[in-house]
Structures are given as C-alpha cells and as structure tokens.
C-alpha cells in the first residue's frame, strides 16, 4: 500500500527527488530478492515517478523552445527595424527593377 501512496504523491516531487527515488527503487529491485508483491509495488511506484519525470522534462523542453524562439525573434527584429527606418538607402537589385518597371510604363 505504501508504494501506491508514493506513486500518487510523486507529483509533489522535484525532478531530482523523483530521479533519486527511481534510482533507489531500481537498485532495490535489481539487488535484493524481493517478494513478487513488493517487486510489483516498486514497479508501480517507479512507473509513476517516470511519468512525473517525463512531464517535468517535457515542460522544461517547451520553456526552452519558447526562450529560443523569443531570442531568435529579438535578434531578427533588431536588424530589420533599422532597415525599415532607412528604406531609401537600399539600392539593391529589387529597387532597380522596380524603377525600370515604372520607366517602362
């Protein structure tokens, strides 16, 4: 029964605490000759902890992706905002072709 309580309470663990508990469960399951009921209880607890860790990792990945998107957007906006402020200075091929089109009409 204690294993079920731990599995349900695993949501309150930090990632590090959950990983530490998972490691101790795996050691106990690998090293000791536990009765079948205890093995199943450890497995159930471990499955809950693993699910918790996966959720925490997925949330962290999303946060990192948002940060990267925000940083790349800031980097891309800075040079473009300078170009928009001073459009007549750009005499690239697109500007020449536009002028040529106007002269032809």
Image: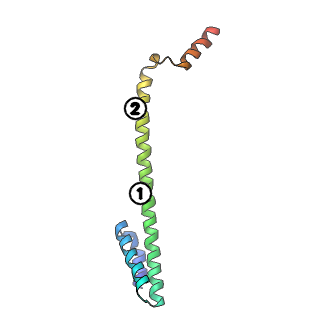
The residue indicated by pointer 2 is 78
Who is closer to the viewer here, 1 or 64? Answer: 64
The answer to whether residue 15 is above or below residue 63 is: below
Task: Identify the image quadrant of residue 53.
Answer: bottom left
Q: Position of residue 20 (x, y in %)?
A: 36, 72
Q: Where 41 sits versus 72, above or below?
A: below
Element at label 1: helix
For this rendering, which residue is in front, 27 or 45?
27
Please say if 98 is above or below 51: above
Task: Name which residue lies at 42% across and 46% down.
Answer: 68
Query: Could you tell me how far apart the alpha carbons at marks 2 and 1 are, in whole angstroms?
Result: 27 Å
Mark 1 surroundings: few (<14), some (14-19) or many (≥20) residues within 10 A: few
Q: Residue at x 44, y 44 (%)?
A: 69
- Could you tell me which residue is drawn at 46 percent across and 59 percent down? 58
Q: Residue furthest right?
A: 105
Q: Do labels 2 and 1 touch, CB within 8 Å?
A: no
Q: Is residue 58 left or right of residue 14?
A: right
In this rendering, the count of numbered labels is 2
Q: Is residue 14 visible?
A: no
Q: Say above or below: 29 vs 13.
A: below
Which numbered disc, 2 or 1, marks the residue that appears first in the sequence? 1
Measured from the top left, where is residue 1 in percent x and y? 42, 85
The quarter of the picture where the C terminus appears is top right
Neighbours of disc 2 within 10 Å: few (<14), some (14-19), many (20+): few
Q: Percent from the top left, x then y, of residue 30? A: 43, 82
- The percent position of residue 15, horizontal first and vertical second, equals 37, 66
Q: In the image as oriented, which residue stretches furthest toward the front?
A: 31
Q: Quadrant of residue 28?
A: bottom left
* Location of mark 1 (residue): 60
Residue at left 45%, top 63%?
Answer: 55
């Amino acid at each position: 029964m204690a294993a079920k309580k731990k599995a349900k309470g695993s949501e309150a663990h930090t990632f590090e605490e959950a990983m530490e508990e998972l490691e101790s469960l795996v050691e106990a399951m690998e090293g000791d000759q536990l009765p079948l009921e205890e093995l199943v209880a450890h497995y159930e607890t471990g499955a809950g902890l693993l699910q918790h860790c996966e959720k925490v990792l997925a949330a962290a990945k999303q946060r990192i992706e948002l940060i990267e998107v925000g940083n790349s957007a800031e980097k891309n906006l800075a040079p473009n905002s300078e170009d928009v402020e001073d459009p007549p200075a750009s005499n690239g091929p697109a500007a020449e072709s536009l002028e040529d089109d106007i002269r032809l009409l």
